[in-house]
Amino acid sequence: MTPWWKKAVVYQVYPKSFQDSNGDGIGDLKGITSRLDYLKKLGIDAIWLSPVYQSPQVDNGYDISDYEAIDPQYGTMADMDELISEAKKRGIRIVMDLVVNHTSDQHKWFIEARKSKDNPYRDYYIWRDPVDGHEPNELKSAFSGSAWKLDEKTGQYYLHFFADQQPDLNWKNPILRQKIYDMMNFWIDKGIGGFRMDVIELIGKDPDKLIRENGPMLHPYLQEMNKKTFGSKNLMTVGETWNSTPKIAEEYSDPGRHELSMVFQFENQSLDQQAGKEKWDLRPLNLGELKKVLVKWQTDIDFNHAWNSLFWENHDIPRVISRWGNDQEYRVQSAKMFAIILHLMHGTPYIYNGEEIGMTNYPVKSIDEVSDIESINMYNERLKAGYDTQSLIHAINVKGRDNARTPIQWNNAKNAGFTTGTPWLHVNPNYHQINVEAALKDPNSIFYTYQKLIKLRHNNPIVVEGDFELVKGTVEAVLAYYRKLKDTKWLIVANLSGQKQHFSSTDKVTDQIINNYTDHSNLTNLTLKPYEAFSVKVK
Ligand code: TEU
Ligand code: CA
């Protein structure tokens, strides 16, 4: 039997920015519950909820100080239980974010661990002596600087692949692993739909050998976790893996290996950065390369023994229409084009909150407007290294994580209906035009394209199971592919560019499926409009 998550569409909620219910300017659980009817109307099957656990919020909740408590800024455990049960009433499952590569430095384990070298919790984390009076080795943090931080009291360094306040857990310790599994079972018992596993590829790390991701113990740990927690339950699990290849993705998701349902892969993220450099070192996107990566992850995975996830956006990456489409003249067309090509592919699609109404990046003018630790640390580090302010702000506007984190634009009222107070992060001023209320009123809005795509997936096995086949010989800016199931064949065609493009096919159209401009009943010598996309049933 096909598991539910193969037919599902998942919607990511970034709680801090979704809906404030009490006027403190911060989104919260009650706010999410109040918007469930909207999500039901969109038609999604599950919500991936970014972290709402107790946290000092150094990294917006990805620094957890108690895995079994709700952060007061988001509400209470009763609010969480209510969200789970209200969602269930609407056929929506709640997938929790599982952040177990590291904790907050305020977690009781770390507070204990740093007290002394022989503290029982010491070995929950990774400690090394200084080497010649400095860091043990050259491992770097994703948030700039060394991955090692000296703890004055005991004179040893601890490992942190992210902020100083996010010490890495020592997965080699079996007692720690069991504590994590107990915590996962606490959440499973609450009736959640599964887990999204933060930077899960790092848990097999071997810092002495400079191994971060894909360490030798990664898969054995996941197999153990599977067995001791969700393995026998009907849950969905998705691992965040920045360094997966199709082969590695198969290792995670082959049902016979009993690890995860699927992983997120990020190969397209490096297409607009200079080779061997960081994401801030920009270069223009080449459409041919984007096409190649998209196709690779459809054809190089054996879907009989693996599964795949599909997404354009999340809370770490910019809005796709601002980045690779057009967020002005062709905002609506390019948003629908990205939706159509992704949602008719093979795999489980994810929608990031606001994507379904075509929310856009919001440029800042100076560093005081930036909230995200990753951007701020990079800015300070590069300023010291002699970069100029203007180019750094430009890079932050193109790639910074705040772009995707501005509050959801619900309506045309003050602060876009997100809060009656002062929003924690600037609301994009384009909310007067771009908001949920306006989208729901307009039958041609991006929202209804997403709604239709979700229905197409639910009602047509070809979208879930059909084979993918690339149409060869198109011009570089045109992506065309078939989905095929038994005698049924759908053709999907998209112009990825803002210029007119040529497309021609001898296929005979038998039905219209979806499009962002007009129907096509004859496919010979078409001139595709900017960002035009359509799908038709063909013979
Ligand atoms: O992200 C992992 C991660 O590698 C990101 O920091 C990534 O490098 C960066 O965002 C790209 O610009 C996960 C979470 O999704 C992120 O929000 C957290 O900050 C991070 O882990 C630490 O938990
Ligand atoms: Ca609030």
Image (spheres, rainbow, N blue to C red):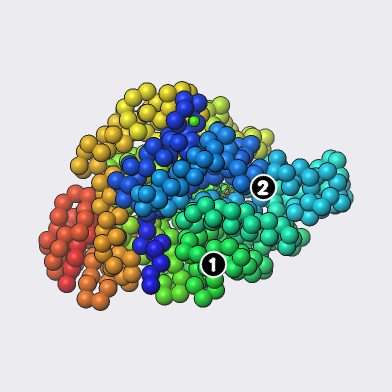
Q: Amino acid at mark 1?
A: Gly
Front in this rendered view, residue 398 or 346:
346
In which quarter of the view is residue 226 placed? bottom right
Mark 2 is surrounded, within 10 Å at the Cα level, by few (under 14), some (14 to 19) or many (20 or more) other residues, namely many
Front in this rendered view, residue 75 or 112:
75
In which quarter of the view is residue 486 placed? bottom left
Tell me if 315 is positioned left or right of 461 in this view.
right
Q: Give the image location of residue 37, x and y in percent.
A: 33, 42
Please report contact status of discs 1 and 2: CB closer than 8 Å, yes or no: no
Residue occupying image coordinates x 87% and y 51%: 118
Q: Give the image location of residue 488, x and y in percent.
A: 22, 72
Specify the quadrant that holds the N terminus: bottom left
- The tag earlier along the polypeptide, 1 or 2, is 2
CB of residue at label 1: within 8 Å of ligand 1? no
Residue occupying image coordinates x 37% and y 59%: 8
CB of residue at label 2: within 8 Å of ligand 1? no
Residue occupying image coordinates x 18% and y 55%: 527
Q: Give the image location of residue 239, x and y in percent.
A: 53, 59
Which residue is the site of mark 2? 103
Mark 1 is surrounded, within 10 Å at the Cα level, by few (under 14), some (14 to 19) or many (20 or more) other residues, namely some
Tell me if 143 is positioned left or right of 506 in this view.
right
Q: Gap between marks 1 and 2, in whole Å?
A: 24 Å
Tell me if 419 is positioned left or right of 280 in this view.
left
In which quarter of the view is residue 62 placed? top right
Label 2 element class: loop
Q: Amino acid at mark 2?
A: Thr
Specify the quadrant that holds the C terminus: bottom left
Which residue is the site of mark 1? 231
